[in-house]
């Protein structure tokens, strides 16, 4: 018996030296320690021995069992460490000095125009503010001098949420909060996405972008409004644009205007894109109504201000010659990629 055990040990040592993979080790373990393995077999054969011999041989087999178990485990651990080392050494290496990949996305033309207008106004001392798209009736209408059932609401039907809030119909919805946040004097612009119940066509969309601006200080007049608009638009279009004001009605400004610029196409002589008038309608604006200032916590006897609501989508169409407003939301990446700057 002893003889058998010793030769089994030798046999195992040889086999262990040859087991070069985790799978081979596992096979070895099963071969020796498994339920029907060599050691179990040896145990079985003890039945034929007498008492003392049985005890002695049993102990020897158990010792061998423990040895085999320990050696297989140790070998498996060594193998695993080697494998880890190999993986680390063969891991993909990155050359951080390689040039970047070129096929990245592009900015949307509206983002480009928005940033440009922001940059221009920032150089003129304006702060850029953000405001939510979901607003309440007070901020979108009441605080702008548009009471319930006022006919001015007709043009601004929008999407109402079940909790009474609504998607803002114009960036003016932020005026009240911004006046309350900054107090007078202030110069702030606030771009935003606006929503209206609109039948869509080449010039109308239910979702569009505006850039609103307000400037409030002592002695602000229409002259300041004209100066800021003319400077900004000349920068955007990279040429000296002429502007003119026509009367326009908005309950939150008094007086209110429609600001036109001389046609970019014909320079004011008259052509099909300005319907031969020489002018393009671009930006509603006006002097902030005293009641609106008051509701914003600003004393209208001390301060005056102007407000404008520039159609960013409109501006992007003019700037890039986009004929159909719906193209902006088409998701056509190839079309959008041409505007990358
Ligand atoms: N909020 C107005 C609109 O979208 C535009 C506007 C803004 C008019 C500021 C005057 C002053 O119709």
Image (cartoon, grey):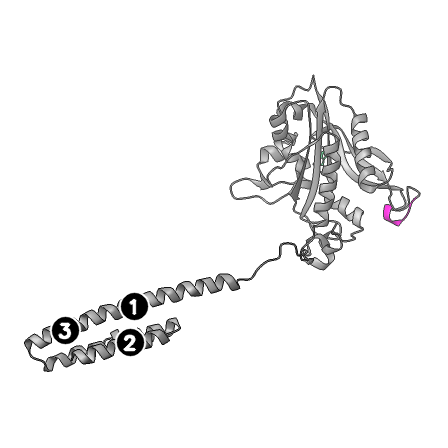
**Residue at x-position 62% and y-position 57%:** 95
The residue pinned by badge 2 equals 12
Left-right relation of 140 to 308: left
Q: How far is the residue under mark 1 from the one under mark 3? A: 20 Å
Query: What label sits on residue 170 in the rendered view?
Result: none
Instruction: Mark yes or no: residue 249 visible.
Output: no
SS at mark 1? helix
Could you say where residue 62 lies in the image, as x and y percent from the top left? 18, 70
Residues at marks 1 and 2 touching, judged by CB atoms closer than 8 Å? yes
175 up-or-down from 341: above or below: above
- The percent position of residue 119, horizontal first and vertical second, equals 73, 37
Q: Which residues are magenta?
A: 270-274
Q: Which label was assigned to residue 71?
A: 1
Q: Is the C-beta of the residue carrying label 2 under 8 Å from the nearest atom of ligand 1?
A: no
Q: Is residue 278 above or below residue 184?
A: below
Tag of residue 58: 3
> 290 or 55: which is nearer to us?
55
Where residue 106 sits: x, y (%)? 69, 53
For the stretch drawn in magenta, the main secondary structure is helix
* Residue drawn where x is 78% and y is 52% of the image: 322
Q: Position of residue 324 (x, y in %)?
A: 76, 53
Marks 3 and 2, Cα distance to the nearest angstrom?
A: 18 Å
How many numbered badges does the structure rendering display? Answer: 3
The secondary element bearing badge 2 is classed as helix
Of callouts 1 and 3, which one flags the residue occurring earlier in the amino acid sequence? 3
* Quadrant of image for the N terminus: bottom left
User: Does 32 lie within the magenta span?
Assistant: no
> Crowding near pointer 3: few (<14 within 10 Å), some, many (20+)?
some
């Amino acid at each position: 018996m002893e003889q058998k055990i010793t030769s089994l040990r030798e046999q195992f040592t040889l086999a262990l030296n040859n087991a070069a993979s985790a799978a081979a080790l596992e096979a070895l373990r099963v071969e020796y320690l498994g339920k029907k393995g060599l050691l179990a077999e040896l145990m079985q054969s003890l039945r034929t021995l007498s008492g003392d011999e049985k005890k002695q041989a049993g102990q020897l087999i158990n010792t061998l069992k423990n040895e085999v178990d320990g050696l297989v485990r140790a070998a498996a651990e060594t193998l695993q460490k080697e494998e880890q080392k190999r993986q680390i050494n063969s891991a993909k290496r990155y050359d951080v000095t390689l040039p970047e990949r070129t096929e990245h996305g592009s900015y949307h033309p509206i983002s480009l125009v928005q940033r440009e207008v922001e940059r221009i106004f920032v150089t003129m001392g304006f702060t850029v503010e953000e405001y939510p798209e979901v607003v309440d009736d007070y901020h979108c209408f009441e605080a702008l001098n548009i009471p319930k059932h006022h006919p001015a609401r007709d043009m601004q039907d929008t999407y109402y949420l079940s909790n009474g809030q609504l998607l803002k119909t114009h960036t003016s919805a932020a005026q009240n909060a911004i006046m309350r946040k900054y107090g007078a004097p202030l110069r702030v612009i606030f771009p935003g996405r606006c929503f209206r119940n609109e039948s869509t066509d080449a010039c109308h969309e239910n979702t569009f972008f505006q850039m609103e601006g307000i400037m409030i200080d002592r002695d602000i007049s229409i002259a300041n409004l004209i100066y800021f608009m003319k400077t900004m638009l000349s920068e955007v279009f990279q040429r000296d644009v002429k502007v003119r004001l026509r009367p326009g009605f908005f309950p939150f400004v008094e007086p209110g205007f429609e600001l036109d610029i001389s046609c970019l196409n014909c320079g004011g002589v008259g052509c099909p894109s300005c319907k031969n008038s020489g002018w393009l309608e671009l930006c509603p604006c006006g002097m902030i109504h005293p009641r609106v200032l008051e509701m914003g916590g600003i004393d209208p006897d001390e301060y005056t201000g102007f407000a404008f609501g520039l159609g960013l989508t409109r501006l992007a169409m003019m700037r890039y010659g986009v004929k159909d407003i719906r193209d902006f939301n088409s998701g056509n990446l190839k079309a959008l990629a041409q505007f990358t700057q």
